[in-house]
Amino acid sequence: MFRLVFFALAALPSMVYAQTTGQRFDLHCTGKRFVGDFKDLSDKSKYLNTTIRYKVDLDSGLWCSGACIETNSIFSVSHTKIVLLFEETDDLEQVVFVNRETGALLDRMRLLPYLVMTTASCAPSAFTGFPARKF
């Protein structure tokens, strides 16, 4: 019994740490968005200024973006990168990831010969929550 209480008390600081280290946050990202054909990637006039918000909850493994109409499962998390989305088929590739050290974001959807790509710099802020579930 003593060992159980001791281990429970010993684990308490790490449990408190996990709840207060920013495992739930919003990311406010500003950068450039390209929509077009791959052949136009070097055309700077095709890049538009953009801002986007991502809501991320690492504890629940969920995220959403923009108006946050629905949540999605996080693909993977490491010490240096959060991969929110990664899907690949013969015709389509979608990836969204943010570098945890630099705040650099890449949000890309490739459907040959077209590309929608956002590169941005993100800063964390207080978590504003997900939409309420209907059931």
Image: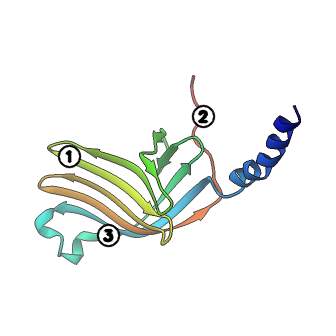
Q: Real-space Cα distance between discs 1 and 3?
A: 23 Å
Q: Is residue 59 left or right of residue 116?
A: right
Mark 2 residue element: loop
Residue holding disc 1: 92
Can you tell which of label 3 and label 2 is closer to the viewer? Answer: 2
Colouring method of the image: rainbow
Residue drawn where x is 69% and y is 52% of the image: 18
**Left or right of 123: which side holds 127?**
right
The earlier-in-sequence mark between 3 and 2 is 3
Q: Amino acid at mark 3?
A: Leu
Q: Find residue 48 and name its label.
A: 3
Q: Quadrant of residue 91?
A: top left
**103 and 6: which one is in front?**
6
Three-letter amino acid code of the residue under disc 1: Leu
Residue 105 relative to residue 128: left or right:
left
Above or below 124: residue 113: above
Residue in the picture at 23% in, 77% down? 44
Q: Quadrant of the C terminus?
A: top right
In the foreground, 128 or 14:
14
Q: Residue 11's mark?
A: none
List the residue tagged with mark 2.
Answer: 132
**Farthest top residue?**
135
Answer with mark 1 or mark 2, whichever residue precedes in sequence.
1
In this view, 44 is above or below 9: below
Residue located at (57% from left, 47% from top): 57
Residue 30: x and y, percent?
Answer: 45, 69
Residue 14 rendering spot, x and y as whole percentages: 73, 52
Location of the N terminus by quadrant is: top right
